[in-house]
Amino acid sequence: MMELRKTLAGRIALTAVATIILLFLALPIVVILVTSFSNNAFAAFPPEAWTLNWYKALFADGSKWPAALSLSALVAALSTVFSLIIGVTAATALTRSELPLRSAVFALVLGPLLIPQIVTALGLFLLFEPAAMLGSPIAIALGHTVLAAPIAVLILIATLRGIDERLEDAAASMGAGRLTIARKITFPLAAPGMIAAAIFSFITSFDEFYIAQFLSSVDTVTLPVRVYNSLTFEIDPSVTAVSALLTAFAILALGLVALVRWIGSGRQQSLLSVENTVGVANPGGDAV
Amino acid sequence: MAATLTAGAPARPRKLLASRRTRVGILYALPVVVYLLVLFVYPIFSTLLLSLQNADGSFTLHWYADALTGVNLSVLFTTLRISAETALLSLVFGFVLAQAICRLKPLLAGLAMLVVVVPHFVSALVRTYGWIIMLGDKGLVNESLAWAPGAPFRLLYNELGVVIGTTSMMLPYTVLLLYGVMRGVDRRLLAAASSMGAKRVTIFRRIYLPLVAPGLASAGLLSFILSLGYYITPALMGGPNQTMIATLINQQVTKENQWNGAAAQGVILLVLTLAGLLLVKAVTSLGASRKKRSAS
């Protein structure tokens, strides 16, 4: 801010410190990516020689990684479906209806995001252990939905609020039924938000550690729990390759969300401009 | 919005329509409410119940007494201390970085924001592993400090390592929060003070700082609260003296099969978190009223 900018030297100092802080955030990720190709996966950085061995070892016979990966993918897929169902209905209720106890419902939705995940995990453990459901992909997915659904709800509330309600009003004024409006106007406009909500639900579940740790059994272990165990109890250099793949996956997913958002904003604009054209061609018509 | 639905059937009475919209609302809110009551609220209540019971189901406060004495108490203090150190450090780093980003041109600011946001979505386990590789005796940090007397420095499996790692996990939250607060400061207030002859230091101290102070307080509290229940990084980068309350809960359940004790620890963590959230709320409403006052 202006009031801090006393001298050129001060400005340079601030920039330098800010750069160091940015490195502080980015370097651990860069280091993982580089190390996954290093022949010495544990001790030295920067690497002395390069190799693809850790990636090959991931899918070698007897490797536990493919099982963990497929369990995590299954759990995340289930959790994404649950979160979308809950997210779409809840966001509709919170933005497009008259809901009694609205703020209480909203507080309930925020709850899982605010209280420590370890507490949620412990509670879910107490719920599923007596039911002999530990290690069940369904149980882990149900648990992950507790965290993923609120995120989906928040994204979809923002999406529905961002849709210009005049478009829905315009369709209604032309005699479209509620179902037609939902199918032809609201759904296509909300689709990018739904895709974003799905991606974030998937990442949330795929990355989740505390709940998965409590709800896993000895034989069924999700990928993050496997990574954690590998870092704590044993030495498996393939963990660098897994980490690098997880990083690439996260960056890819974020890129996809950005792309979908960008396409979505263009779509609403073009619809709105059609509306404007209609308005211009029809100057006597009702203002929407 | 009510007008939308009337448009198709203008003759229908308004009250009936409102109740239809209420019914739709209740119907659509049901999935999330039922889901979270069964899988979130009920499990937390059973945790609370369990923490107050003996093995035979009779009422006791034994588990709380146990949680607040001896080793368990020192774990609680360690948790509070590490969380406070982390919160302070992420607040300072966050303040400097958000200030710097505020002053960048839009393109560079966007790039810097990307560097803040992208790591946030990369698994905490992966980032922690990156830190372990970087802070080792032959890691990047020690290699580049090899000239310094006393090198290699011990940066892992102690509190320094834990605080470095955990701060990098909390920093994205504080940067994003503080950036939002700083962008929200009405520049006309600063200009007004300046036009009346106030010096820069005075403007910073009397106008800018009071306006961003509630944001600073809530960013600090937020990273404190988030650190309280966190253990991925402390467990991997710390030694036995850095055991935090969440690690203890995990150990009690998975290793010792001691659910009641774990439940009591969980409730203590929950109470600390809720107290922190109430403070955040108080601070935020204070900020809102202060902003209103200085604008009028």
Image (spheres, coloured by chain):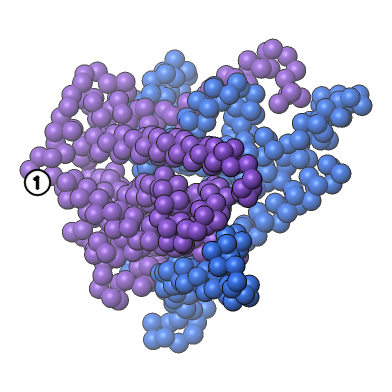
Instruction: Name the residue nearer the viewer: A210 or B284.
Output: B284
Q: The purple chain is which one?
A: A
Above or below: residue B27 compared with residue A242: below
- Compared with B215, B67 (above or below) is below
Amino acid carrying label 1: it is Gly
Q: Which of A84 and B5 is in front in this view?
A: B5
Q: Residue furthest right?
A: B196
Direction from residue A231 to residue A67 in the image, left or right:
left
State the residue lying farthest toward the left: A61
At a point 16% along the width and 46% down the height, the residue shown is A66
Measured as percent of width and height from the top left, residue A209 is found at 35, 52
Name the chain under label 1: A
| Residue B254 screen position, x and y as percent | 31, 63
- Label 1 element class: loop
Q: In this view, does A106 lie above or below B216?
A: below
Mark 1 closeness class: few <14, some 14–19, many ≥20 residues within 10 Å = few
| Quadrant where the image shows the N terminus of chain B | bottom right
- Left or right: A13 in relation to A73: right
Q: Where is residue B229 in the image (x, y as percent from the top left)?
A: 48, 55
Query: Which part of the image, by quadrant, shows the C terminus of chain B?
Result: top right
Q: Is residue B90 visible from the viewing direction of this image? A: no
The colour chain B appears in is blue
Residue topped by disc 1: A62
Q: Residue at x 72, y 39 (%)?
A: B212
Residue A30, image x and y in percent?
36, 27
The reply, left or right, for residue B109 in relation to residue A217 is right
Q: Which residue: 10% across, 39% down?
A: A60
Residue B158: which quarter of the image? top left
Q: Which of A98 and A169 is in front in this view?
A: A169
